Image (tube, coloured by chain):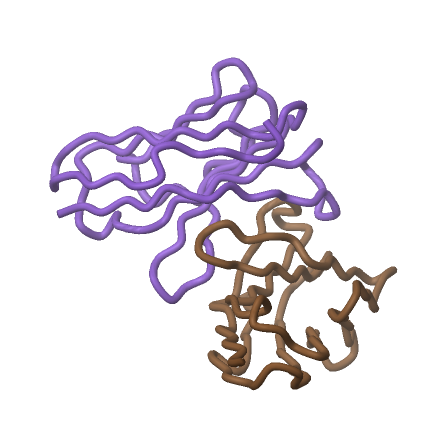
Amino acid sequence: EDKVVQSPLSLVVHEGDTVTLNCSYEVTNFRSLLWYKQEKKAPTFLFMLTSSGIEKKSGRLSSILDKKELFSILNITATQTGDSAVYLCAYTNSNSGYALNFGKGTSLLVTP
Amino acid sequence: GAGVSQTPSNKVTEKGKYVELRCDPISGHTALYWYRQSLGQGPEFLIYFQGTGAADDSGLPNDRFFAVRPEGSVSTLKIQRTERGDSAVYLCASSRSGGSSTDTQYFGPGTRLTVL
């Protein structure tokens, strides 16, 4: 059965810390892995990683995809209280290339 | 509008009632998706529209759930004979063209449905 597993489920850090969130996947006919940030309700898009783009960076956030070991990490440096959110990882595959299949998420709390 | 909008933001209903949830996608986006998110879980795919037609409704849990998009823009998710287990946040997303794993989906703020 195709799936993504996120770890840890929750995390509390102090402002300024660096955090690493993990998403391991077992997916047949894999196409892409995506990261979303969810504050309150609407998930907002962060990164998409595919076989042709395994490393992405935007400001303090970066992500890599390890196609051999089948995992992705989301790294946040110099965390701020505004980074507090649930971070969702999702995959797509060729079976249903448009549907996003999400993990349970990692709840991150950044304390002042 | 600038983003995906959904109405109402909150809906409380009684078991057995009928509800409609509305989604306004980003202007010009041809693809529209509905997801359902239960507490402590990630969003779960329900249905995907390409234009006016439902290209994939395999995620709808049963025949009490139905969705339409008559003019290829606004979509309505309809739930008949609601059950307490239908309580969740219903999220709508749209993308420019759809049908591709590289087409970014943009989500609305969702409708929180509570069935008493």
Against B42, residue B36 (above or below) is: above
Report if residue A49 is visible in the image.
Answer: yes
Q: Nearer the viewer, residue B50 or B18?
A: B18
| Relative side of A62 to A12, left or right | right
Against B83, residue B95 (above or below) is: above
Percent across and percent down for residue B5 are: 49, 33
Q: Nearer the viewer, residue B68 or A28?
A: B68
Q: Which chain is brown?
A: A
Report if residue B58 is visible in the image.
Answer: no
Specify the colour of chain B: purple
Which of the 4 quarters of the picture holds residue B29?
top right
Q: Residue furthest front?
A: A112
Residue that appears at 49% across and 22% down: B74
| Relative side of B60 to A21, left or right | left
Residue that appears at 66% across and 82% down: A20
Which of the 4 quarters of the picture holds residue A57?
bottom right
Percent across and percent down for residue B38 are: 35, 57
Residue that appears at 40% across and 26% down: B76
Against B24, residue A7 (above or below) is: below
Against A66, residue A97 (above or below) is: above
| Relative side of B65 to B71, left or right | left
Q: Nearer the viewer, residue A41 or B20?
A: A41
Residue that appears at 81% across and 65% down: A56
Q: Nearer the viewer, residue A4 or A75?
A: A75
Which of the 4 quarters of the picture holds residue B80?
top left
Percent across and percent down for residue B32 are: 56, 33
Counting the numbered discs, the total is: 0
Q: Residue furthest top?
A: B71
